[in-house]
Image (cartoon, grey):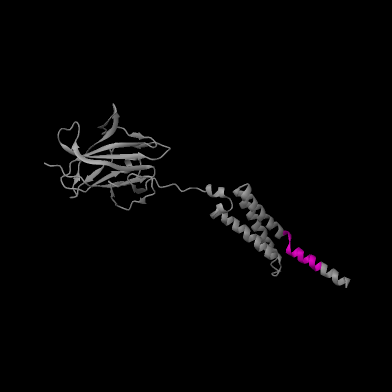
Amino acid sequence: MPHSRQERAREDRASITTLFSLSGVAGFCCVALALAQASLMGLRWLTIALSVVGVLIAGSGAWSRRAHPHSQDRVWLAVDGTLCGVIILLICFAPGVLNSRWAIDRTVQQPDPNELTVVPRDKAMQRGRLLSKDETVDAATEALRQDDVVARIESAKIGQVSGRGDKLYLLVQFRVVNSGQGQSISLEAFNESPPTLSDSAGRTLAFVEPRLKQIRNRSVVFVDWSGRQAVEIPPRGSQDVMLIFESPLAGDPLQLEVDSAAWGRKGVCRFRIAGIHPAKT
């Protein structure tokens, strides 16, 4: 009888040793330390290192027990290895689950500065929609945004130009807005890529010149800007340019195309202008 009790005690100790082997305990410690470190200290590299060590311990322990497929310790090792693997996957693909700060630290994809977005004319900072290929927007209700640059038409009318006699021209007041908060935007004088305008009959109207809006003696004036240097538009600022074309002969609508290279971007802004009547001759 005593002999039987001694054998049973040895079997119980062996069962406990099998269940709680050094490899299983070490793997579980790696899991616990990795989770605690992720939530408290927040060192991502240390969390990954502890998880990798846990996977290695579980893998080596399982390999050493391959001759004992029914060993209960293999369950612990499998759980430890799986948990460590899950931690590594979470760090790679969903770090915010382990630490909310890690989700904030992820690299934010920068917007394409050349991407043209159609926005409401008076609410240019709304999300808007992407401009489709060769699309023309309605100048009366829509504007175009490229990152922190907004382009829109303020007005279009037929009238005279100071210094050019009694001849009538089409005057398009074009506005470029810097909606950013960091850097100024350089606006060129349309010397290399002049805007183009066509009427409903498909006839291209000659571009005469651009004139820059300025405030002089508390009055708004448009001064000659042909061949001159670029102007800087400060953050939250805007600049108006009067684009002067020959007067249209056919009725509306008109289509204005402005190359966004004038403000350092790539692409073409196309606006449909309605409500312009040809000049009477």
Q: Quadrant of the N terminus?
A: bottom right
Residue at the extreme left of the image, as rendered: 281
Q: Quadrant of the C terminus?
A: top left
Residue at the extreme right of the image, as rendered: 2
From what the image shows, is residue 7 above or below residue 61? below
- Which residue is more in the foreground, 241 or 268? 241
- Which residue is more in the foreground, 218 or 269? 218
From what the image shows, is residue 31 above or below residue 230? below
Q: Residue 158: which quarter of the image?
A: top left
> In the rendering, at what x and y percent does residue 7 appear?
83, 70
Give the magenta part as a residue range. Answer: 10-22
Q: Is residue 20 magenta?
A: yes
Q: Main secondary structure of the magenta part?
A: helix
> In the rendering, at what x and y percent does residue 250 appear?
16, 47
Question: Total of numbered circles in the picture?
Answer: 0
> In the rendering, at what x and y percent does residue 59 appear?
66, 61
Look at 87% across and 71% down and name the residue there: 3
Look at 16% across and 38% down and name the residue there: 168
Position of 101 with respect to 264 (left or right) is right
Q: Residue 242: which quarter of the image?
A: top left
Res 86 visible: yes
Q: Is residue 82 magenta?
A: no
Position of 134 with respect to 162 (left or right) is right
